[in-house]
Image (cartoon, rainbow, N blue to C red):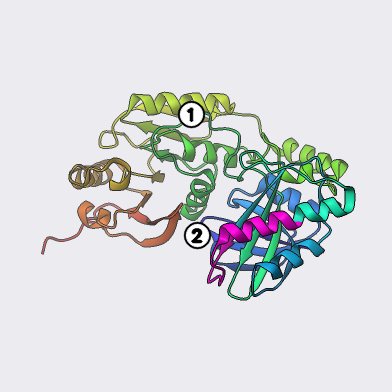
Amino acid sequence: MNQFFATCPRGLEALLVSELAEFGAKNIQPTDGGVAFSGDMPVCYQANLESRIATRILWQVGRGRYANEEDLYQAVFKLNWPQWFDVKRDFLVKVTGVKCPLKSLEFATLRIKDAICDRFRQAVGSRPYIDTKEPDVRVHAYLAAEDYQLYIDTSGNPLYQRGLRRASVEAPLRENLAAGIIRLSGWQPGTPLLDPMCGSGTFLLEAAMMALDMAPGSGRHFGFEKLNNFDAAAWEKLRLKVLGRAKPVSFQKIYGSDADLRAVRVSRENLKQAGLLDAVQLSHVDMTEVPAPAESGVLIANPPYGIRIGEDEALAALYPKMAEALKKRFAGWNTYFLTNDMRLPKLMRLSPSKRTPLFNGPLECRLFEIRMVAGSNRREKS
């Protein structure tokens, strides 16, 4: 049984726990920013292929205690790296420290890299090369106050890179965060879903893939394919089974619009490239004018926030107009807004029923849930 650690956006750990349980993972233990679990390699393959929430699936190859760089070098040197990847594969070492006592993480990175290269020299008489941009193999080291953990990354590029979105407008949302927000909203395929500020179409793409049971990793490759223990037959069997589940593309009551014509064009192009254009209806209309496409449904939006466009006053004027549009046309809808602007509910004069802390990269945000039951969300003037 192998030990793994799946990283994810902070705030989505519980959703990742549910996914991993579905894939057959054992000993699932959530922590801040990820979930530890155990399983065989096919479970790892499935998590990479099917997880909508994970950022990376890391395979633990070593752990122990250390006090200095020399301890790390010796611990890394003792591991059988040539068993895990070929000397012809170039690699990268990434070190993360939390309460780490070492003066320089850069020097620690260098010593770990040296230990791996020296182990290869001892075993096969040559060393693998370093590639800091597109390495075949990524080695991750996590250094705490007294303990280290060493991982080989089975994902390669981060899993939010679905291989779908070709173009983007300013400040696109990461795909796994978008998928998590859709899950947190409770939306189910068949229910109308609207993103009235669709940008490059990330919510639309993720919702369409969910509705059609398309695996998020079906259009890309993974780091585990370059490891010595890669089981090509098991991978192909899993891949064909998962791909065979996908439904034919048809309209899924998913709607997207934006006030920016360029954003609508970018969304259309991204949906077309992904083969999902027929699943979504797009329109060029301002959020304050957008009609409700059905009597009830789920509205999800990532409004521009100050850090994105630097116009706090413009936002303060926009929020009341957004609220007016919701009150006029969206009674019966559940609405969700991701923002780092905590003024949003107050300026909209609407009371959120939930405030879920989420992180968009390093940026702390809130997902505000506002249920538009006619007349019940309006705040009385004091």
Locate residue 39, reporting x and y percent.
78, 61
Q: Which residue is mark 1?
A: 167
Q: In this orientation, does residue 16 appear?
A: no
Q: Which of pointers 2 and 1 lies earlier in the amino acid sequence?
A: 2
Q: Work out whether residue 334 or residue 204 is closer to the camera in this orientation and state it.
A: 204
> Residue at horizontal 61%, vertical 37%?
212
Q: In 3D space, how far apart are the residues under numbered discs 2 and 1 (Cα atoms)?
A: 26 Å
**Where is the N terminus found, in terms of image quarters?**
bottom right
The magenta stretch spans residue 204: no
* Residue type, label 1: Ala
**Where is the C terminus found, in terms of image quarters?**
bottom left
Q: Work out whether residue 166 or residue 67 is closer to the camera in this orientation and state it.
A: 67
Locate residue 341, reporting x and y percent.
29, 54
* Residue type, label 2: Arg
Residue numbers of the magenta segment? 96-115
Q: How many numbered tags mark residues here?
A: 2
Q: Which residue is mark 2?
A: 10
Q: Seen in the image, is 234 located left or right of residue 246?
A: right
Label 1 crowd bin: few (<14), some (14–19), many (20+), radius 10 Å: some
Q: Seen in the image, is 98 located left or right of residue 381?
A: right
Locate residue 88, reporting x and y percent.
81, 40
